Amino acid sequence: MLKLKTKSSAKKRFSFTASGKIICGSAFKRHNLRKRSQKMKRQARGTMVLSCSDALSVVKYMPYG
């Protein structure tokens, strides 16, 4: 049986918690921040846990994660 390859872009952007959930950085924090509310920018700091529907697509890219 062949080994499956992990997508390089996925391993740079996502990581797994000990319980198997997927952690990622928040979106919409790169540019045009003057349009965003202060509340949105504050809540988007750090990392967040992906929702189940999004996590299913990421798991396919990281078979050994």
Image (cartoon, rainbow, N blue to C red):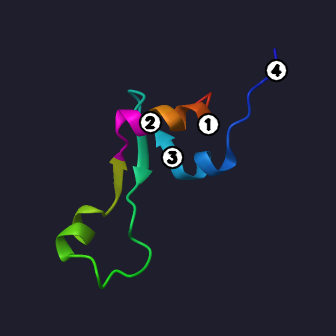
Q: Earlier in the sequence, mark 3 or mark 2?
A: 3
**Residue type, mark 2 in image:** Ala
Reading the image, the residue beneath label 1 is 61
- Magenta highlight on residue 12: no
Q: Is residue 21 left or right of residue 5?
A: left
Residue 4, image quadrant = top right
Q: Residue furthest left?
A: 39
How far apart marks 2 and 4 lie (CA) works out to 24 Å
Along the line of sight, the residue nearer the viewer: 19 or 38: 38
Residue in view at x 43 percent, y 79 percent: 31
- Write down the residue under mark 4: 2
Element at badge 4?
A: loop
Q: Secondary structure at mark 2?
A: helix
Q: Quadrant of the C terminus?
A: top right
Position of the N terminus, as image quadrant, is: top right
The residues colored magenta run 49-54
Mark sitting on residue 1: none
Residue sitting at 62 percent across and 28 percent down? 63
First in sequence, mark 2 or 1: give its number: 2
Q: Is residue 15 above or below residue 47?
A: above
> Is residue 61 toward the left or the right of residue 55 in the image?
right
Q: Label 2, on which residue?
A: 55
In 3D space, how far apart are the residues under numbered discs 2 and 1 (Cα atoms)?
10 Å
Name the amino acid type tagged 1: Tyr
For label 4, the crowd category at 10 Å Cα-Cα, with few meaning under 14, some 14 to 19 and many 20 or more, is few
Where residue 28 sits in the image (x, y, percent)? 39, 67
Question: What whole-number distance in Å separates the C-alpha atoms at marks 3 and 2?
Answer: 10 Å
14 above or below 21? Answer: below
Q: Position of residue 44 (x, y in %)?
A: 29, 62
